[in-house]
Amino acid sequence: MPGVHAWHSGDQWEFYKPILEGDVFNYTNELVDVQVKDSQMAGKTVIQYHDIKYYNQREELVAKAHDWCVRAARKAAEDKGKYADIKVAEYTKEELDKIYKDYESEIVRGANPRYWEDVNAGDALQPVIKGPLSRRDIYAWLIGAGSPFIKAHGLAMGFFQRHQGADMVDARTGLADVPELVHMEDSRAQTIGIPGAYDYGCQRISWLDNVITNWMGDDGFIKNLNGTLKRFNIVGDTHWMKGKVTKKYIVNGEHLVDIECWGENQRGEITLPGSATVRLPLRRRA
């Protein structure tokens, strides 16, 4: 849609089976709802909701995602300037030293099981730090995730020929390229009202996985994970991914724990509220 941008805004994941090395997947993606709303960011917006189902080579349903994205006119978002007040982060040596120490304090439980009996409501999860965000972090994540848009030379030109209007003009340079470059170029991000290049929404939601899997260990299993993207995470920002246990219970023989989780930046803003349910093992009794 020429002139219309899309912002990944949230995911609700359900996981049914482990994903094993060597598995191959097919998926279906169904548009399930469309809502028109007024927003402070860009005036008239359209929210698209999708159900995505992932099947392995045995045709087993492994996971399902209900996600949504916000679409709005790029020029309207630039003119509104809702996020123009976001300042590029600056750090003192003392602040950076604290960040480095937080990296050193990360605990990956791994093969050391966390048993359901040992968990109580109110328990805090060891935070996981991400940042200060750099373009290197974004590129590394993109290499693993892949992209239908990032192509080179003739392949890129062929894409534009097949998809007329898929390009986005940089207001400063006049260069037309894929909208995905808002995650890499400040001037292109500023064209849609964001002060600088920012992370991928699904990249940040995956960080919630990190704090939970670190805490639960290899024998735990995430049943569901939900995250809603509330504010932007621009290059230079630092996030602490945090969580706490809110409930433990048993359903159909599964020993479950509910977790409130979130991403909080150096400004003290919660940019990504979330929640999860985890299945934990029981201690083996003689």
Image (spheres, helix red, strand yellow):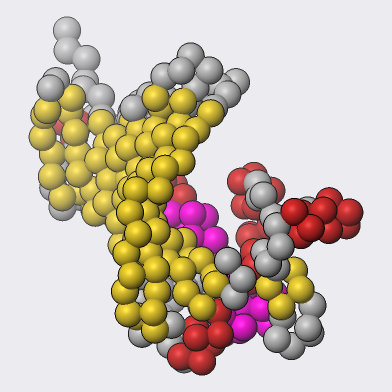
Residue name at image x 58 percent, y 66 percent: 1
Q: Residue furthest right?
A: 154
181 vs 116, nearest the viewer: 181
Coordinates of residue 46 in the picture (x, y in percent): 39, 68
Q: Nearer the viewer, residue 188 or 100?
A: 188
Quadrant the C terminus occupies: top left
Percent position (x, y) of residue 127? Answer: 38, 56
Q: Residue at x 46, y 25 (%)?
A: 55
- Give the image location of residue 255, x and y in percent: 17, 28
Q: Position of residue 142 (x, y in %)?
A: 65, 52
* Residue 132 in view (yes/no): no
Image quarter of residue 284: top left
- Residue 274 vs 219, above or below: the answer is below
Residue 41 picture quarter: bottom left
Q: Residue at x 43, y 61 (%)?
A: 69
Q: Say if residue 169 shows up in the picture.
A: yes
170 shown above or below 80: above
Q: Is residue 224 left or right of residue 208?
A: left
Residue found 30% across the figure and 40% down from its top = 224
Which residues make up the magenta segment? 185-205
Side of 24 where 241 appears, left or right? left
